[in-house]
Amino acid sequence: MKNLLLATAAGALMAGAVGAEEIKLGISLGFTGPLESMAPDMQQGAELAMKEVSDSGLLLDGSTVTAVTGDSTCIDAAAATATVERLIASEGVKGIIGGMCSGETIASLENVAKANGVVMISPSATSPALSTIEDDGLFFRTSPSDARQGQVMADILSDRGITSVAVTYTNNDYGKGLADSFQAAFEEAGGSVTVNSAHDDGKADYSAEVAALAAAGGEALVVAGYVDQGGSGVVRASLDTGAFETFVFPDGMVGNALESNFGSEIEGSFGQNPAAEGPGRDAYLAMAEEAGFDGTGAFSAEAYDAAALILLAMAKSGSSDPATYKDSIMDVSNAPGEEILPGQLARALEIIAEGGDVDYVGATAVEMVGGGESAGSYREVQITDGKLEVVGYR
Amino acid sequence: MDIANALVVFLNFVFIPAAAYGAQLALGALGVTLVYGILRFSNFAHGDTMAFGTGTVILLTWGLQAMGISAGPLPTALIALPFGIALTALLVLGTDRAVYRFYRKQKAAPIILVMASVGVMFVMNGLTRVLIGVDEYRFDDGARFIMDVRTFREMTGLPEGLALRSTQALTVGVALVVMVALFWFLNRTKSGKAMRAYSDNEDLALLSGIDPERVVRLTWIIAAGLATIAGTLYGLDKSFKAFNYFQILLPIFAAAIVGGLGNPLGAIAGGFLVAFSEVAVTYPWVRVVGYLVPGYEPSGLMQLLGTEYKFAVSFVILIVVLLFRPTGLFRGKSV
């Protein structure tokens, strides 16, 4: 009798869970380290998408999705590798949202994710090196490569009729990658780069660096640095010595600190940073506000999109196995199909269940190009009357 | 006209920045050389004494600004400076009490005192960070420029511009005043003469009735004053960040050793020598040469070393001097 009861109970449980499983997704971000202030908003973005899908009950016969977080530290590749190893080996995650910085992402992708065949979608690693990396089709990113930004920056300069510039970059992978891709794109377009030299962050005095840039000359100075670091120091020294009057600011420099540091002193300078516009972003911001966090945080929307893409791809391929669903990610992110905005994930799952096609647009207007990275849209800004003003999108 | 342009470029990018930087190094090196001459050890904590002194000056400056007190066109920090010096002198005297006096009583070898000063350096380093934080602060107020690029161009009609920041002029001015005062003190006053006597021969000075503890106290107070002034001028001219004062220690030591450790005149010469070498070696001369030699268009930048190697210049000068003239250019004590 007892056995019968047990068998019946077990049977009932089994029946209720046909096909349904508890899917774990890893979130590997730099919760400590130089970008620690950005990580919480990104985590909440990713978890928001997971919750939305779980609550709908429409993923793989009512499977639920839970997040497992790990600290990638952003700068310590060994620590990031260990974190991803733990997420995959002991937590058994089916996909990873991360890593955060380019170097750490490359290390954990090559050492762990590839070896275990687990999909990684990074919301924020922007190094051009990740475009060409041998990834077995497992790596994607919802942020654009810096190579793309170099191209956009070259286009903006060409459109403004500037033909010769000096370039200074912060002495790390980000700065060097961006400066080099810009130089290539700008020279391709017929412009000339008079000098392409590094500056180190955290110094008190940049007059020597600026003297060298001024000697090379140019109509404008491209500052591929950080606004809270040496980038501002270079701009300050340039203004003081009259070396340059017009500056071009890539994403690391576009911040409110520009207004407070320089204001109208850099009138007419311009730049660009990745930011989508439109209903997708608006919808995401509203959802984030309702969930109690700041959706405008850098790469928070990209994290939401990364998680959403993994889950939609699972639904599309009918499996939570990375080896199977990795081939569906490009499929759900691009046309053809019905456009999906944040908050419409349930609708997307319904369409997929009916055998239809979806084109995930998401919070950042995702359009996967190349080996699986977002084409990205950029906001062109200009300093007018001492204020940062958006003058267009490209 | 071309010669005028070349001169303006040279002044703007080489002479003025190097002169201000040289004055800051000279003041720092004076403090180091004074401690070396009288207490007979290289004080590694000097850079962080500068940081601590500047930190207190900044805190006092904020207080003054909050009370609405300002020095007109001059930076408010100048009013705060004497109080900052007093606080720093207290800290340094306390350090001497707690650390150096013990080793002095033991007649410990100079290397032990040097190592002790490394320890003091880390403690002061931490103290400054606790006090004011690790961020970058700018605390210059008042008039920013004596001459800015635009005004200069309008005045002269030259295509090249010249800028002279008020902090640069202030740095050189204050440094000159402090140096003259220091030499007057060392050569003309009784206490100054006692210090020099103690430096020349400790035993003979003791026999002549000079109180060694008083000389030591005076030395520390002057060193604290020099450190605070040098640090504040450096911070005013550039910006304050606790870590930067640790980095500036190397060129300061290079300046003091090049001039001859223990020799105040040498410290000043060494400061300017190191500063001008650093700037001149890493400056691309293409534009100056372009103006001076008509029709000559060099393809490169005519830059001897990349700006990343600025600190390497002080190392090279240091090594060359130690190899060929170990007592320094001005015959200081042998290292």
Image (tube, rainbow, N blue to C red):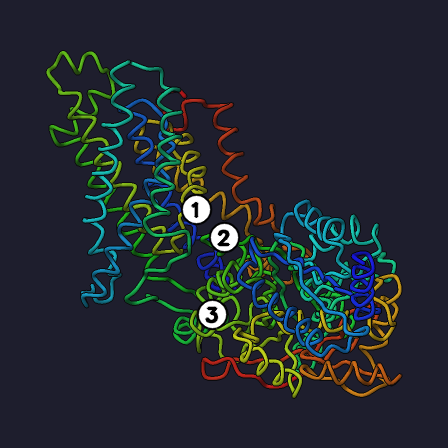
Residue corresponding to mark 2: A202
Instruction: Say if B177 sits above or below A16 in the image.
Output: above
Q: Residue at x 71, y 84 (%)?
A: A344
Distance between the Cα atoms at labels 2 and 3? 16 Å
Q: Are marks 1 and 3 in contact (CB under 8 Å)?
A: no
Distance between the Cα atoms at labels 1 and 2? 8 Å
Chain holding disc 1: B
> What amino acid does circle 2 point to?
Gly
Residue corresponding to mark 1: B243
Q: Secondary structure at mark 3?
A: helix
Q: Residue at x 82, y 85 (%)?
A: A351
- B233 vs B123, nearest the viewer: B123
Local crowd size for mark 2, using a 10 Å CA cut-off: few (<14), some (14–19), many (≥20): some
Local crowd size for mark 3, using a 10 Å CA cut-off: few (<14), some (14–19), many (≥20): few
Q: Are marks 1 and 2 in contact (CB under 8 Å)?
A: yes
> What amino acid does circle 1 point to?
Phe
Q: Position of residue A255 (x, y in %)?
A: 52, 71
Q: Position of residue A378 (x, y in %)?
A: 66, 78
Q: Is residue B274 left or right of residue A92?
A: left
Q: Position of residue A118 (x, y in %)?
A: 81, 57
- Residue A79 visible within the image: yes
Instruction: Say if B30 sits above or below A276 in the image.
Output: above
Distance between the Cα atoms at labels 1 and 3? 22 Å
Q: Secondary structure at mark 2?
A: loop
Number of numbered discs visible in the structure rendering = 3
Residue corresponding to mark 3: A257
> What amino acid does circle 3 point to?
Ala
The answer as to whether the residues below labels 2 and 3 share one chain is yes
Instruction: Say if A311 sits above or below A355 in the image.
Output: above
